[in-house]
Amino acid sequence: MYRFSALINKEWLEAIRDKRALFLTCFMGLMGPGLFILIFTLLQNEISSNENTSVNIINLHYPALENHLTQQGFEHDSDAPISIEFPTDMTSALSQAKKITVVIKGNLANQNNQSAAANIERSLARYSQQISTTRLIARGINPTIIHPFDIQVENSANPASSGAIIVESMLHLFIMVIFIGGMSYVIDSSAGERERHSLELLLMQPISTTEVILAKAAMAWLLSMTTFMIAFLGVLVVFRLYPANEFGLSVEMSTFDALVIIFAFLPLSLLAVLLEYLLAFQSKSYKEAQSYMNFVVFIPMGLSMWLQFSSADHAIIAWLPLVGQQHILDATFKDQPADWFSYGGVFILTCVIDVLLIMSLAKRLRNEKTILGL
């Protein structure tokens, strides 16, 4: 026990001295909340910009349509990038029930102009429908004859799941932070120590390779979970403090639900650092280990994205590491009933894989090729 405590103390001192690893931990943790703040800011700016749209209205001398455009948030401005040109004989054409050609001009390569033009087109289409309805009523025809279907959409989603579409993207962020959070320390404490010949000196001490792996994995796991906690709690704070309700989003999570997610990601975070150690000890040099780490990050993220957009939904698949954590996260944010049997299966299976990886790494450290990088 004393030897293992000494190993933990040694790894702790090396971790806090590694400024790059600490910076990466804080940066990756704060990147998620900062990203959602940026998204909400852009959405808020877009909503505010669409409240009053400046449009150059040409040849419009029809008070009813002018009032309609004003109510829809369009203001006349001769210098506006978007213009609406009406025909000069619009009033007489309307009285004779003739078709009127309205031209919307502007540089539609610009995203803002394209959005404004689409809003103008929808507004004019609504007013055109009002005129058609009025004409039918004036001729004694029921206007519903041209609209046989009355389509009504009822959203049965509860307020907690209304922001699920955006929230689902957080899974990729959480996967990225648990893999990158301890990556710098993993490379330095494996391939880095081997190049500095300190790993060989460490293994010459009267300690087992299992204790060495446990000490290193514990410190890397601590950095990985710290990054995850910063990102996870930061995102929850952003959703609570930022006016997300203005965009139709609402994320409410109890303390128990948050603890369930954190508890589910504990073995997954350990699995991430163990896989990184496996590749780091497999590499021949420090730079080669850095190259291998790209696969550790992007392969799980690609698998997660494929599972999110695919139709694969089997009970056994839900028990797999990473897939099970994705289901837990989705179910919690969508306020779905918890499947505790599946949750327990995911946790146990991930822990079993962690134990097997620890045993494999301990055996690998007893090989001279791994120690000397041959």
Image: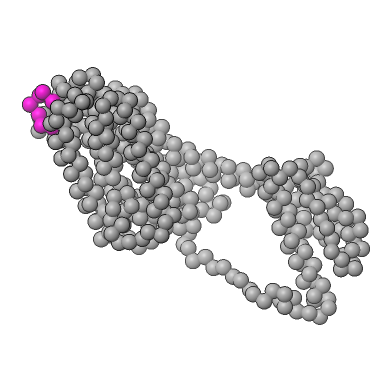
Q: Position of residue 271 (x, y in %)?
A: 26, 42
The residue lying furthest to the left in this view is 206
Q: Quadrant location of the C terminus?
A: top left
Name which residue lies at 52% across and 49% down: 244
Name which residue lies at 20% across and 41% down: 357
Residue 18: quadrant of the picture:
top left
Name which residue lies at 36% across and 35% down: 294
Q: Position of residue 127 (x, y in %)?
A: 76, 62
The residue lying furthest to the front in this view is 374
Q: Camera-side residue: 207 or 368?
A: 368
Q: Position of residue 213 (x, y in %)?
A: 18, 34
How many discs mark residues in the rendered view?
A: 0
Task: Evaluate whether residue 347 shows in this view.
Answer: yes
The correct choice, above or below, for 60 with respect to 275 in the image is below
| Residue 184 drawn in magenta | no
Q: Is residue 147 left or right of residue 191?
A: right
Q: Is residue 166 left or right of residue 86?
A: left
Q: Position of residue 173 (x, y in %)?
A: 41, 43
Q: Camera-side residue: 314 or 246?
A: 314
| Residue 207 drawn in magenta | yes
Magenta part of the chain: 203-209
Task: Evaluate whether residue 188 shows in this view.
Answer: no
Q: Is residue 203 left or right of residue 153?
A: left
